[in-house]
Amino acid sequence: MLKKLVTALLLLTVISCKDNEQAAGTDKHVVKDKHTQSNADSVGIKHLDLDVKVDFDERVIIGRASWNIDNSKYQKDELILDAYRLTVDSVVVDGNKAQHSWGPSVTHLGTALKIPIGENSSRVDIYYRSDPGANALQWLEPQQTSGKKHPFLYTQSESIYARSWIPAPDGPGIRFTYTAKVSVPAGLMALMSAENLQQKNDSGIYHFKMDIPIPAYLMALAVGDVEFKAIDERTGVYADPAIIDMAHHEFAEVGEMVNVAESLYGTYRWGRYDILVLPSGFPLGGMENPRLTFATPTIIAGDRSLTNLIAHELAHNWSGNLVTNATWNDFWLNEGFTVYFERRLTEKMTDKSYADMLWELGYQDLEKTIADLQADDNMKDSHLKLDLEGRDPDEGLTDIAYEKGALFLKHIENNVGRERIDAFLKGYFDAHAFSTITTEEFLSYLDEQLIKGDKALADKINVDAWVYGPGIPAGAPRADRERFEKVDTEREKFLSGTVPASLNTQNWTTYEWLHFLRKMPKPLAIGQMAALDKQYNFTNSGNSEIADQWYVMAIAANYQKAYPAMDDFLGRVGRRKFLEPLYEEMMNTGKEAMARDIYTRYRGNYHPLAQGTFDKTVLKEKDKQ
């Protein structure tokens, strides 16, 4: 009851403070976010006009960022923007040159860019360049791409990395529209999280428009040798010419996926939905940049078995892009809702038993995350509502937000039924479209629109335990494990001496194979590893999920036959989901020298964000400011 009272008081505080907050985009208000030094809560940030050149020789983005602002309400004497290792050459305010200044460097946050403005100021032009080591940017040499003919650049702005390539108010609760002019070398194509051309032009100059307000973390740019191939009238795929046909085949069902998503939770509101397949150094599975999902090539398995990741990124266009967490402490409102949506979408595209496997694997991931937090005596980070002040917000990008958040919605579904939760979620997306929301505001909406004073239902849902409590609450839902129980039977047969050729593995999906391997004792005997490899050729699997799990087992068992393929895998793939368990297993099994050797050789292939992770865990370097 105390937490509910606190929630109510917080909501009243938000409401009472609305007169002291300045709208951004279509938001009702801007919540003060501890991970931005900008003053967008008091100076209205309306629109960005970007005019930049991409310089591959110097590895910089250079040009002008022009902000349309509204200072009429509070009449502040300065505009403060986030910046990280940016060089500002000059600033012009309302047509007149202005003298900017810098705040002190703050760990994780960078340096505040301070620009004097007048009470009627409406335009601020910033002439700047990025740093060659900007942590949002990965510059790739031709040999690091599929075609191996041209260089490539892409951005990764989530969580607070947009500030390393644009001077911006870099918080998830601050939305703005943008236009852009991007100049690139001849023969390359530029794409953004906006309206995009579908073919290269001869000028090397590309123009973009995003007329829906978005937060800075959804700003995205990619430049390279790419082609477009349509899937249907509103979906398509961009990729290196060397893999465009493979990518198109893999994503052939995406048009239908958008239609099914709409049947669940309402109209897709972003116009087109296209996918850009990035080079393999991309550190994530996917990034939900509006109108253009960035995707890892590791989901191209040839049999569409890993495209569930696209269901996740598509779902973000409702949860995250449409309704955005106001701060990174509220990140579960982004990812938890998206995982729940993804699983419901996947179930409609396949069947319940298939989705149940995803729920169960997610539950296993959640259990591991909680065990790790417990070992670190950090159970506070197993709450859905986080406290990340003074910390890197990436510390909140864990399975707590994803899997515990989704499980909370599944728990609500089990207590109210699908019809009611679907109506509630559709209404939630409609009511908060193109705006931001805090955890407290969501809980108030939940209380008003779904619980509606039903004390028995409120007790069953038990918001306090889920949102403000540690771990997995008692009575949490668990998926039907019928398909995995059959897998368990075959694993036990193998461990009891049955030869792999006699196991009943016909028609297994990726997720059945993952469960089969995940639950093997570690380490297996060399003979057992060899027998499995001979029958199923795991060492040379073209399925990145299966290959990664197999290589973890190979490290533990010292199964050296798999090491050359693993070495090649670590040289090609930059996705942290795959790199982390491999380097961690090496570091934990006395193979530190092996880990350092491989990482040192391939470090240049990884994104700066991945380098930051493994410099600390593999090379044991301290944080660099």
Image (cartoon, grey):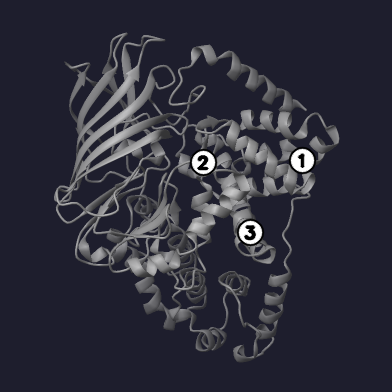
Instruction: State the CA–CA distance, disc 3 to disc 1.
Output: 25 Å
Residue at 57% over, 83% down? 525
Q: 559 or 234: which is nearer to us?
A: 234
Q: Amino acid at mark 2?
A: Gly
For mark 1, what is the residue?
461
For mark 2, what is the residue?
320
Residue 375 to residue 26: above or below: below
Q: Position of residue 334 (x, y in %)?
A: 54, 42
Q: Earlier in the sequence, mark 2 or mark 1?
A: 2
For mark 3, what is the residue?
348
What number of labels is visible?
Answer: 3
Helix, strand, or loop for circle 3? helix
Q: Nearer the viewer, mark 2 or mark 1?
A: 2
Residue at 50% over, 65% down? 306
Q: Position of residue 407 (x, y in %)?
A: 67, 49
Helix, strand, or loop for circle 2? loop
Residue 169 to residue 70: above or below: below
Q: Residues within 10 Å of mark 3 (few under 14, many from 20)?
A: some
Residue at 39% over, 64% down? 297
Res 47 quadrant in image: top left
Residue 355 to residue 110: above or below: below
Residue at the extreme front: 233
